Image (spheres, rainbow, N blue to C red):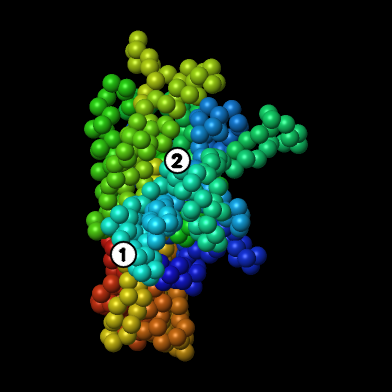
Amino acid sequence: MDAIISLCKRRGFAFQSSEIYGGLGGFFDYGPLGCALKKNIKDFWWREMVQLRENVVGLDSSVIGGSKMWEASGHVAGFSDPMVDCRESGMRYRADQLFFSPVAISGKTICHLSILDSPQMEEDALAMARSLLKKRGESAAPDKLRLRPIAEATAEELRQIPSPATGTIGALTAPRAFNLMFRTSIGAVSDASATAYLRPETAQGIFVNFQNVLASSRLKLPFGIGQIGKAFRNEITPRNFLFRMREFEQMELEYFIDPDADWCRIHGEWVESRLAWYRSIGIGDKFLGKEVHAQEKLAHYARACTDITFRYPFGVCELEGIAARGDFDLRCHSAASGKALDYFDGDKHFMPHVIEPSAGVDRVFLAVLCAAYGEDEIGGERRTLLRLDPKIAPVKVAVLPLLKNRNDLLQLSREIFLKLRRRWNAVWDSSGAIGRRYRRMDEIGTPLAVTVDFESLENGSVTMRFRDSAEQVRLSIGELESAIGNLVDWK
Ligand code: GAP
């Protein structure tokens, strides 16, 4: 993870937000290469989910919504995480990530505390507790070790639990609900009617526009409305770089279906279709997984949910959630607004149900980098490379004159570059030894490098080098565009 974060900063993929002021926790800015990669991911999602599906249309709704809308959706009352405070340091923790194991040491119960970001870390946490006991020369307890959520701690146990911030026993408060919505107010008067919220999901903009889209298009069930945009959550513990942020981006599709349709089958088909999409952007099966949510862990709106997971360096975590939301949202908005959000099918009218594949752009971005990151040796030289799928690589081709001090090489390479740049994101680079320039391109995942050398001046041919194998082929300048197009264009 450190290698990836450092590459992101060094090469301009992502920076800590407001870094010169000490950084703003949970916020990141995307640099020149980062915004190009992110745009490619979003464009490819849009193409596969909206453009290539006849029964899906797009939407771009407001980021800010009035309180009536967010009350109706259940977010004002229920969009919260359980939070625990450390009274001593003021640090806040998500209670569902805090686990304790009561252990008896020399007849006295003490509690060991662990923070778990993902269930897979449970074994590590238990191993830590065991080694703690071993250090203290205690042997009896390890096989009895069991991690319990802090929400289950009795008042007595809570008094025994150390704060993760200061280590002080008993400094933690009992869990309480913390609403994740960012509140703001609209206009100059700041009374209750001016209260508004930054959206914590793009989905609600789709539900409140359901009738507008239906009335203005000729859609018939089943149909979908897709949207890409920013979402904001005042996360208690933003962490793991781009994984859990306070401002992030979502790519969401609400797929409306007949309430009598076999929603289980349709839900399953979406899960498979989304897995195929991840494979198509170069994320291999060894990184991907599925996790079906237990009924008691479902969000307030969901009747079923399957996560697509990714094996990040810090654990297996959610990449995308695919929920069956029933008619929860349309029903809530219809009741609160007094507007009929019905679908008419001949003499039948009803509220459609919805299946929702919802992906986080930033989590996909991070997953793509993690899956592509590699280090190897080419011709006796170590290199770092990103084996990015050419479809989403931020730079598609580099044009390199073999030598810097030859005007004829510079001129011909500039001509080629200016032509290629009209179709693809291309760079021209003349500084440093050719091997170093190749490695600079490998490190940012550029799939192809075209080198203009002396033979180019004689017979109009160039070399094309492939990032992963470092192999080179010779081809004529006239063949270049179609050869590059075959390798990097979306089919
Ligand atoms: N409309 C449904 C919904 O918002 P969610 O599981 O809360 O469901 C969907 O979020 C996706 O948004 C997640 O799978 C994840 O990729 C992304 N996401 C959620 N919270 C995030 C955060 N704090 N930082 C980055 N991405 C986040």
**Label 1 CB less than 8 angstroms from ligand 1:** no
Q: Is residue 113 left or right of residue 283?
A: right
Q: Tag 2: Cα neighbours inside 10 Å, few (<14), some, or many (≥20)?
A: many
Q: Quadrant of residue 171?
A: bottom right
- Residue bearing mark 2: 227
**Which of the 4 quarters of the picture holds residue 185?**
top right
- Furthest toward the right, the residue is 188
**370 over 316 or under it: above or below:** below
Q: Nearer the viewer, mark 2 or mark 1?
A: 1
Q: Which image quadrant for residue 111?
A: bottom left
Label 1 sits on residue: 139
Which residue is drawn at the image coordinates 53% and 40% (left, top)?
177
Q: Residue at x 33, y 45 (%)?
A: 307
Q: Whole-Å distance between the Cαs marked 2 and 1?
A: 56 Å
Look at the numbered disc 1 and give the secondary structure of its residue. loop
Please name the amino acid that badge 1 sits on: Ser
Is 203 drawn above or below residue 435 in the view shown? above
* Residue 342 image offset from top left, x and y in percent: 42, 18
Amino acid under label 2?
A: Gln
Q: Position of residue 345 (x, y in %)?
A: 34, 16
